[in-house]
Amino acid sequence: MKESVGNPLHLKSVNHISVICRSVEESMDFYQNVLGFFPTRRPGSFNFDGAWLFGYGIGIHLLEAEHPENLPVKKEINPKDNHISFQCESMGAVEKKLKEMKIDYVRATVEEGGIQVEQLFFHDPDGFMIEICNCDSLPVIPLVGEVGEVARACSRVNLQIMQNQNQIQMVKHL
């Protein structure tokens, strides 16, 4: 019998994402003043420029590009591009703040089973896509397990319970 069917690497959570940037200072300003992250201590043994920030349970590691002039410049905001997504309390407040900050964004709506999810997409200073949404209103429905099992996107407890139940179900089928 396998020790961990649903979590073979025994993962606990996302720790950080790394973003290559043209200017660490400009990117730090964005992640602090637009998204609300705060700087944290970065090991001094690194031999390249960068910064670490933390917020909302996740780290953002900024890595200054060796050749910033070679980084592609993204102008078009494409919701189907690589991105990180954050849930918010009020989509209206986010949209108002983005307008005040003169940050270009694209609005999108997803509908599933009568539930509407609003999304706003915009770029950081280097063209990395940021999504702000009210995605927690859309249930996470696993493709395996019993019909009717539902976990909220923002509920780690419900998701853990669901994962444990799926592991039990999978062990029963072995």
Image: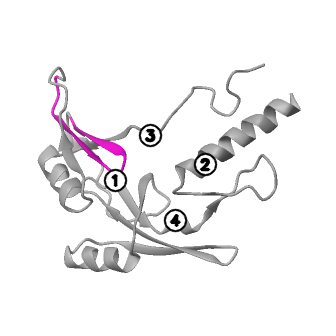
Identify which residue is drawn at 19% across, 31% down.
42
Q: Give the number of the disc on residue 14.
A: 3
Instruction: Give whichever of 140, 45 is nearer the camera.
Output: 140
For label 3, the crowd category at 10 Å Cα-Cα, with few meaning under 14, some 14 to 19 and many 20 or more, is few
Spot occupied by residue 39 in the image (x, y as percentages of width and height): 18, 44
Q: Amino acid at mark 3?
A: Val
Q: Amino acid at mark 2?
A: Leu
Dot 4 or dot 1, earlier in sequence: 1
**Element type at mark 2:** helix
Q: Give the number of the disc on residue 159.
A: 2
Q: Is residue 148 above or below residue 25?
A: below
Q: Give the number of the disc on residue 128.
A: 1
Q: Is 58 left or right of 69, judged from the image as shown?
A: right
Dot 1 or dot 2, earlier in sequence: 1
Measure the alpha-carbon separation of dots 3 and 2: 14 Å
**Element type at mark 1:** loop
Q: Amino acid at mark 4?
A: Cys
Instruction: Give whichever of 136, 104 is nearer the camera.
Output: 136
**Magenta span of residues:** 47-65
